[in-house]
């Protein structure tokens, strides 16, 4: 071992470089989060969903008349609506989950993008209704009328689809979709 040469000393950092490093670290810790917050505050707010102002969750709507009403984005979750009249109503984006609407009239109604899972629609009339994009898993459509209904992009259980295909016919008057094709009938 040669002990004659001492170990090399680290090269000194010029004071200006140290100042720049400190300034960059400060900006990263302080200014960047403030800019992010400012961006969030100035960003446009997402569009608010239109709400009818009425919540029918867990209510009794048996034989109620909602004919032609604007019920977009309304909640009927867990509601009972035997023989209710929704003919021509706008129910776009509504929530009907775990409800019962046996023998209800949805003819000509806009039910697009409705969450209708686990709903009893036995004997309901969907003639000419628009049901595009609905989620109807676990629902009961036994005896439902679907002449001229549009089920494009709907999520329906295979058993319900086969049952609805037995009676499906016609073309939807609003969208022009063939009912059988929209259900994926063979």
Image (spheres, grey):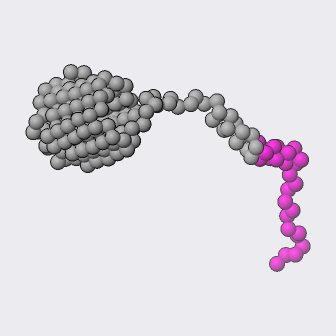
The one nearer the camera, 24 or 155, is 155
Residue 22 is situated, as x and y percent measured from the top left of the image, at 82, 47
The one nearer the camera, 4 or 62, is 62
Q: Is residue 134 above or below residue 175?
A: below
Residue ID at (17%, 39%): 123
**The C terminus: image quadrant:** top left
**In the displayed structure image, the side of residue 174 where residue 165 appears, left or right:** left
**In the displayed structure image, the side of residue 94 where residue 42 appears, left or right:** right
Q: Quadrant of residue 60?
A: top left
Residue 130 is situated, as x and y percent measured from the top left of the image, at 26, 29
Q: Is residue 97 visible?
A: no
Q: How many marks?
A: 0
The one nearer the camera, 20 or 132, is 132
Residue ID at (82%, 78%): 1
Return the residue found at the far left: 166
Residue ID at (21%, 45%): 140
Please report the bounds of the magenta region as a residue range.
1-27
Q: Is residue 4 magenta?
A: yes
Q: Is residue 57 magenta?
A: no
Q: Quadrant of residue 141?
A: top left
Residue ID at (31%, 23%): 68
**In the displayed structure image, the side of residue 68 where residue 144 appears, left or right:** left
Residue 173 is situated, as x and y percent measured from the top left of the image, at 21, 21
Residue 114 is situated, as x and y percent measured from the top left of the image, at 33, 36
């Amino acid at each position: 071992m040669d002990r004659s040469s001492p170990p090399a000393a680290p090269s000194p950092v010029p004071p200006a470089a140290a100042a720049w490093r400190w300034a960059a670290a400060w900006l990263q810790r302080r200014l960047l989060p403030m800019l992010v917050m400012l961006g969030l505050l100035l960003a446009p707010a997402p569009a608010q969903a239109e709400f009818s102002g009425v919540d029918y969750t867990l209510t009794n709507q048996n034989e109620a008349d909602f004919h032609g009403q604007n019920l977009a984005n309304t909640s009927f979750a867990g509601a009972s609506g035997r023989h209710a009249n929704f003919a021509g109503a706008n129910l776009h984006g509504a929530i009907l989950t775990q409800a019962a609407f046996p023998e209800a009239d949805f003819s000509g109604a806009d039910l697009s993008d409705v969450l209708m899972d686990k709903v009893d629609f036995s004997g309901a009339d969907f003639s000419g209704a628009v049901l595009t994009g609905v989620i109807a898993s676990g629902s009961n459509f036994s005896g439902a009328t679907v002449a001229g209904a549009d089920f494009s992009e709907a999520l329906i259980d295979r058993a319900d689809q086969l049952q609805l295909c037995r009676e499906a016919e016609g073309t939807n008057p609003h969208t022009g979709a063939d009912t059988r094709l929209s259900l994926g009938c063979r």
